[in-house]
Amino acid sequence: MVYEKIPIVDTARRCGLVLDSRTLRRREVEATCPFCGDHGRGKYHLSLNTATDQYRCNLCGAHGNSVTLYSMLNGVSNKQAYQELARGTNVYPLPKQPTPQNTEAERQPVSLEERHAAYSTMLSYLTLLDKHWENLLERGLSEDRIQRNEYRSMPETEQGRRLLASLLRSCGFDLLGVPGFRTYYGDWTLSGPNGFLIPVRDKNGLIQGLKIRLDDTDDPGRKYRWLSSRDMTNGTRSYSWVHVTGDTASKRAYLTEGPLKGDVASFLAHDALFVCIGGVNALNGLTDTLLDLSVTEVVEAMDMDQNTKPEVRNAILAMRKEVQKFKRWKYTKYTWDPAYKGVDDYLLSRAAAM
């Protein structure tokens, strides 16, 4: 039987899911996941693909299409779900052949060297607002280290973002293939929420991508976002690149989550080597990075909320299993007072007590 096309976003609305209004114009709309209990203001782990009308939770892995989503949440068969959806929402015939728009490959980022050159020049044009300076100082970083790490504030006006793109193009950068940049009514501009930029570097100090520490967020679990222009006109997706900070000649690498956390912890631990994944589920490139560093010991230094959040604990166990496949590394776990969530918080408390 050939089903008609039933929009996944319409189905999600009928099922009572909360949608992130900021993503409604994207190909992938974000929503709350009804399967893993991620309910709460600002928590949107369920991705709704409007091109394929399928869903997938980035936290628990639940997936399916419009019909299965409706059937599971309403306790009916797939056949009944389809019939109810077909009666109660706009239904569009499936195209007999996919159009080029549907089959066009997603634009991939330009090479690391090209990204580093574009981002380095971009950061040279930007400054760091006082409120962001204060934020970084409160985390325990020195003024010298803040300058060395090249944190910068996102331009807060559209005029400033277009001017930045124009300056980069005048320097010879194409911007096509550079995550974060896109065209809007024919003009190049920078896309992303307000906040400050965190360079995510490889072991040689090259900038792979940029993460934004958001100014406005009500959800502690979504304070950071990759600088990306995915699903935008002439835009480019970002990946969850692994950040390396500290003494890259060290034989011991501390493993944690988040580039800023790693930067702070490394500084407070006298430039200890930290390898930082983008999220507890973002394992791509982790073992390759460790192999490239030639370390002999890996010390797990993940957040202490693993003790109270089963989904975090399970993700860390999967990461641990992946790393321990390689017998060349001694694998240990660094623990601290759970009153301090992250290793950076704990090290800052120790520094303050000295």
Image: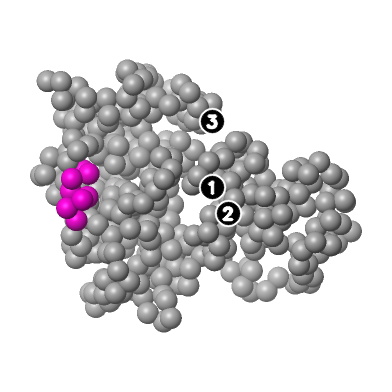
Q: Earlier in the sequence, mark 1 or mark 3?
A: 1
In front of the other: label 3 or label 2? 2
Instruction: Name the quadrant containing residue 109.
Output: bottom left
Q: Earlier in the sequence, mark 1 or mark 2?
A: 2
SS at badge 1: loop
Find the magenta span and give its range. Answer: 129-136
SS at badge 2: loop
Q: Nearer the viewer, residue 118 or 139?
A: 139
Q: Residue 135 location, x and y as percent? A: 22, 44
Instruction: State whether residue 206 is above or below residue 352.
Output: below
Instruction: State whether residue 223 is above or below residue 90.
Output: above
Q: Marks 1/3: CA distance?
A: 15 Å
Q: Residue 265 location, x and y as percent? A: 25, 32
Q: Earlier in the sequence, mark 3 or mark 2?
A: 2
Q: Is residue 89 left or right of residue 61?
A: right
Q: Which mark is residue 319?
A: none
Q: Residue at x 78, y 44 (%)?
A: 74
Label 1 sits on residue: 44
Q: Marks 1/2: CA distance?
A: 7 Å
Q: Nearer the viewer, residue 20 or 275?
A: 20
Instruction: Name the quadrant containing residue 121.
Output: bottom left
Is the residue under label 2 in contact with that under label 1 (CB below 8 Å)?
Answer: yes
Label 3 sits on residue: 311
Label 2 sits on residue: 19
Disc 3 crowd, CA 10 A, few/some/many (<14, 14-19, 20+): some
Q: Is residue 197 left or right of residue 225?
A: left
Q: Residue furthest bottom?
A: 186
* Amino acid residing under circle 1: Tyr
* Amino acid residing under circle 2: Leu
